[in-house]
């Protein structure tokens, strides 16, 4: 299994509708823009692996995949429950984390 291999770039064509839509048929976009993914290297917040993935421009992803995001959400829920219990057992106020 080699999931470390960087995926090829993905192109996506975005259709832009604007003011000119008044003079053009509604089904015809004013222009098309092609956005392309680029390799983004980041550290997964859950498994702490350094991964490089093809991503569309935007915020840096936090998790290397759906599985890690799912696990992190579960872990986050568990941590919240534990904090909640701890707070209500011995009035320990924890500092804001993160
Ligand atoms: Zn991960």
Image (spheres, rainbow, N blue to C red):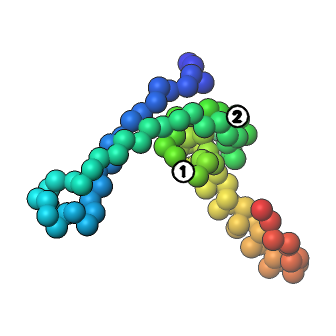
**Residue beneath the point at 52% across and 40% down:** 55
Residue 92 spot, x, y in % from top left: 88, 76
Against 35, residue 89 (above or below) is: below
Please indicate whether residue 92 sits to the left or right of residue 28 in the image: right
Q: Is residue 71 visible in this depiction of the protein?
A: no
| Label 1 C-beta lies within 8 Å of the nearest ligand 1 atom | no
Q: Residue 81: x and y, percent? A: 70, 67
Q: In the rendered view, does 96 fall on the left or right side of 4?
A: right
Image quarter (top left, top right, bottom left or bottom right) of the C terminus: bottom right
Task: Look at discs 1 and 2 and give the one toward the viewer.
Answer: 1
**Tag 2 or tag 1, which sits nearer the N-term?**
2
Report the side of 41 relative to 67 (left or right).
right
Q: What quarter of the picture does the N terminus occupy?
A: top right
Q: Identify the residue under disc 1.
A: 58
Front one among 65 and 55: 55
Which residue bears the numbered disc 2? 50
User: Is the residue at mark 2 in contact range of ligand 1, meaning its CB lies under 8 Å from it?
Assistant: no
- Which residue is most to the left? 25
> Residue lying farthest top?
1
Q: Residue at x 58, y 52 (%)?
A: 59
Q: Which residue occupies 32% across, 43% down?
A: 13
Q: Judge by depth and name the residue closer to the eye, 25 or 47.
A: 25
Counting other residues with Cα less than 10 Å from the Cα at mark 2, is it few (<14), some (14-19), or many (20 or more)? some
Residue in front for this viewpoint, 26 or 1 = 26
Q: Is 71 above or below relative to 53?
A: below
- For the residues marked 1 and 2, what is the alpha-carbon distance in whole angstroms? 18 Å
Q: Measured along the vertical axis of the image, is residue 48 above or below residue 15?
A: above
What secondary structure is found at the residue carrying circle 1?
loop
């Amino acid at each position: 299994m080699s999931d470390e291999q960087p995926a090829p770039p993905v192109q996506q064509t975005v259709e832009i509708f604007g003011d000119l839509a008044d003079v053009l048929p509604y089904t015809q976009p004013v222009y098309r823009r092609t956005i392309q993914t680029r390799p983004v290297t980041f550290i997964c917040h859950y498994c702490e692996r350094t991964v490089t993935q093809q991503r569309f421009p935007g915020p840096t992803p936090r998790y290397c995949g759906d599985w890690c995001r799912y696990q992190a959400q579960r872990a986050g829920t568990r941590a919240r429950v534990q904090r909640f219990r701890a707070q209500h057992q011995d009035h320990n106020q924890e500092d804001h984390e993160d």
